[in-house]
Image (cartoon, rainbow, N blue to C red):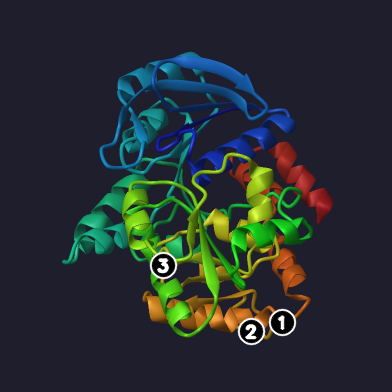
Amino acid sequence: MKIVHIANFYGPKSGGIKTTLHQLGTGYVARGHSFTYIVPGTGFYCEESTSGTKITMPSIEIPFSGGYRIIRNNRDVKKLLITLKPDVLEISDRFTLSKIGAWAGQRNIAAVVFSHETLSGLAKNYFPFSLKRIVDWHNRRLSSRFKHVITTTEFASKEFEEIKTTNLVRVPLGVDLDKFSPYLRNEEFRKDLLQGADVLLVHCGRMSREKHPARSIEALKVLLERGINARLIYVGIGPMYVDLREKSKNLPVTFLGYIADRERLAEILATADVSLAPGPIETFCLAALESLAAGTPVVASNTSAVGEFLLINTSEPVGAIAGNTGHEFANAIERVLEMRHDPKLPQRCFHQAENFPWSATLSLMLKLHGDSQEVKRRLRAA
């Protein structure tokens, strides 16, 4: 099968979308399929990788986005698709690339779209008034242009379920269980990161407005006022980087920037005491799942999807959820720090992450694409 994936907001310092593309591509290729991914760049280039064939196309940098780019001309994308002749088309941009879904359908190319964002959440985040009618209209139009709309969590599915979308499919993302592990915890490295503190907090993610990265600093201030000697580590970059540096002046905060080395990132996550995911509209949050795989419990916003995989309503949770204030996050962090007295917690976190292997994501995607061999493989496994 020839699979082509088009994604905007992909770049050298991208997070979840890049990880998802590379994991899917590697899996497709390993199972004998052809995979090409088309992403924005500074020009037209083509290169081979273990994740498939990567094609970059001329693009426009989005102002104030911290370097994110979108493909400049969809006509050129269509011309390229005519040359590539895909059997299946995957889209990771519900806004600027949605017309390509309808175009593909007219040419009998099965096209699916990933809804990586919740439009209703974005609207509430940026506008003080309701845009529900516009959101519903956009989501109906989006679903009409594709064979399937793919969401990754119950939270992400909600806005489509409200309008009774019939071609909605849920496919959870995964985590690299070989790369992220509690056994990577490094006490010497931990001392270096703590710089004299007792508690190590890590915030891994893009520094953009909708993710509310300043919430972690707000929580840190409350913890310090309560006499908890904590240090906060930021991993990532984004348009709010300078603002966060300003807010953290005279506070025990370290900015490590974007870390391309996944092994190093895994070590950082495993070495922390608590991982913070304050984004109120996260539809999955790979960094949170990677933290669990590294044995580190997570504190997340109670309005995001992250709580869905923290086992909150069980006797053995692997994190906590909090209201969207610094005080509420500080309270949740303290509860999780109490949980850290249980020596089995890191393994519980890892075992929960084991429920989300990339192999399961891959199998669901191939089944969705009608791969008969995948269906037979799943039947044999059952």
Residue 164 can be seen in this image: no
Q: Residues within 10 Å of mark 2 (few under 14, many from 20)?
A: few
Could you say where residue 265 lies in the image, as x and y percent from the top left? Answer: 63, 49
At x 59%, y 52%, the residue is 173
Image position of 258 with respect to 56: above or below: below
Give the residue type at disc 3.
Ile
Q: Which mark is residue 338?
A: 2
Q: CA distance from mark 2 to mark 3?
A: 21 Å
User: Which disc, if any, is residue 217?
Assistant: 3
The quadrant of the image that shows the N terminus is top right
Q: Residues within 10 Å of mark 3 (few under 14, many from 20)?
A: many
Percent across and percent down for residue 171 are 57, 53
**Amino acid type assigned to the residue bearing label 1 in the image:** His
Image disc number at residue 341: 1
Residue 67 location, quadrant: top left
**Residue 282 drawn above or below residue 112:** below
Dot 3 or dot 1: first in sequence order is: 3
Asked which quadrant contains residue 76, the reply is top left
Give the quarter of the figure containing the C terminus.
bottom right
Residue at 47 percent of width and 78 percent of height? 224
Residue that appears at 41% across and 67% down: 217
